[in-house]
Image: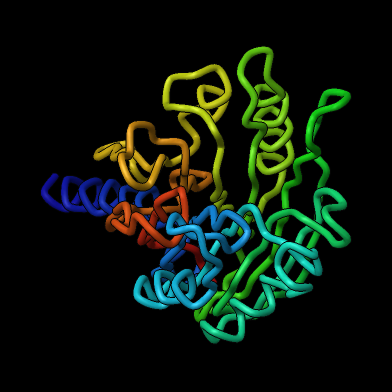
Amino acid sequence: MTARIIYLGFTRLLVLIILICPAQAAGQTAVSDTIRALTYNILHGATMDGDYNLMEIAQVIKQANPDLVSLQEVDRGTRRTGGLDLAAELGHLTGLRPLFGKAVDMDGGDYGVAILSRFEILETSNHPLPSSPNREQRTLLIAAVRLPSAARILFAATHFDHSSPPSDRPGQAAFAVKLLEKTTTPVILAGDLNDVAGSTPMNLFGPGWLDAAARDPEPTFPARTPERRIDYVLAYPAGNWRLVSCRVIDNDTASDHCAVLAVLVHFSSQ
């Protein structure tokens, strides 16, 4: 009888270990990576002092020490920025790999979003978001990146429609959610989503998504007197991620938005 009790106890313990640690039980090793993800609407390099100062934007980014950056309102080759490629310039100034995603033609050049990455970029895609006639086209830029552990994630940068109702934001959020949730690769989505928590577009990011600032939702816009939180770092699926911290970066001159920095741990198995 004693031996049977010991055997049953050992069996239950083994089952519990397998349930809790399936990767290890299958002969795999659990690994993790800490990722510093930043989102920043840079107002095409214009500052709140009325000048044009990429160095100030670069300084905000460098002080945050991010691994991945989502930039919105990014010019490439426009007259208003003297023909500069802002993503490339900021990549040079920060030491990060730049990637530009065009949304529309603008002032003799291009305008859209961008990604800066400390990690190796493996693949890229740029997806036009649903937009009504006569509304500014928006885009979803996605980069597959390799983490230090060799795990692969997707980092997505976007900028949703800013107009008042009727708005394109619900359709754009639905498009992004459908596209990103169908992948088997974990995702970070960061950008200026132009709506507040609890709105119809933001409610489309369901319980499977981790909102990095949900526990401490500080406002992000306008930079000099922040009133609304419209800049987000989101991660999917939530079970692959643990939030370490999230903060709004207090700088009221570099842009009309505050930057948001989230520190996340990604879990995977090898």
* Front-most of residues 13 and 232: 232
| Residue 247 image offset from top left, x and y in percent | 29, 53
Q: Residue at x 24, y 52 (%)?
A: 7
| Residue 9 image offset from top left, x and y in percent | 20, 48
Which residue occupies the extreme top position in the image? 166
Q: Quadrant of the N terminus?
A: top left
Specify whether 186 is left or right of 167: left
Q: Is residue 208 above or below residue 198?
A: below
* Front-most of residues 39 and 142: 39
Whether residue 61 is visible to the viewer of this picture, yes or no, is yes
* Front-most of residues 40 and 201: 40
Residue 162 appears in which quarter of the rendering?
top right
* Front-most of residues 204 and 62: 62
Count every numbered label the image shows and give the total: 0
Specify whether 266 is left or right of 17: right
Q: Residue at x 36, y 70 (%)?
A: 64
User: Please, which colouring scheme is shown?
Assistant: rainbow
Which residue occupies the extreme front position in the image? 50
Q: Is residue 69 above or below residue 233?
A: below
Residue 134 appears in which quarter of the rendering?
top right
Specify whether 228 is left or right of 75: left
Q: Is residue 72 above or below residue 163?
A: below
| Residue 25 image offset from top left, x and y in percent | 44, 63
Residue 254 appears in which quarter of the rendering?
bottom left
Whether residue 17 is visible to the viewer of this picture, yes or no, is no
Which residue occupies the extreme left position in the image? 2
